[in-house]
Amino acid sequence: MSFLLDPPLLFISGVLIERRVPADRRDGAEAATLGVFFGGSFGLYHNVPGLGLLWRPFRAHNGRDFMWNSGVFNVNTTPETGKSGWPLHATAALIFATYPFFLKLGRQLGRQLGQLTASAS
């Protein structure tokens, strides 16, 4: 889970929810999916102990480093002494706020695909 990987994974999850989960359980599946992503991502961002198995394979320094850099980018996640780091945290909050959007977008595509296959039959 990282800011690079989460949006496409949420989108794919939304498509799968619409295509594979019974209609009466989709909202619950959406809530559970968001819970897993928010819980895991918040945990990584706040360096909760025990999540090293998620960030170590990407050669990240810690969970926050993984959330920002995903082993690809080079965002400085440890501001120099005396700097608050609040712009980084504010940007993270904005990114977290987009998570439901990506899941909803995936669900919308899943519904459209379902309508296409139903009309083709």
Image (tube, rainbow, N blue to C red):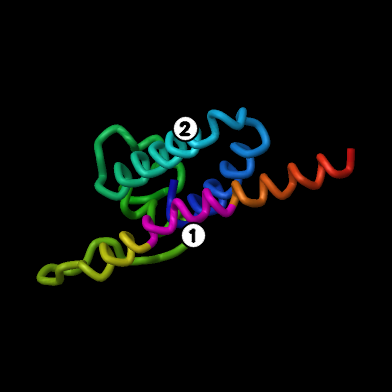
Residue 65, x across and y down, in percent: 34, 55
Provide the major secondary structure of the magenta segment. helix
Q: Secondary structure at mark 2?
A: helix
Figure check: 23 above or below 10: above
Residue kind at label 1, given as amino acid type? Val
| Residues rendered magenta in the picture | 95-105
Q: Residue at x 52, y 54 (%)?
A: 102
Name the residue at the left extreme: 82
Residues at marks 2 and 1, CA–CA distance in whole angstroms: 33 Å
Residue 66, x across and y down, in percent: 38, 51
Q: From the viewer's perspective, tell me whether residue 103 is left or right of residue 90.
A: right
Q: Residue at x 57, y 54 (%)?
A: 105
Q: Which residue position holds label 1? A: 72
Q: Residue at x 85, y 44 (%)?
A: 119
Q: Which mark is residue 28?
A: 2
Quadrant of image for the C terminus? top right
Figure check: 106 above or below 18: below
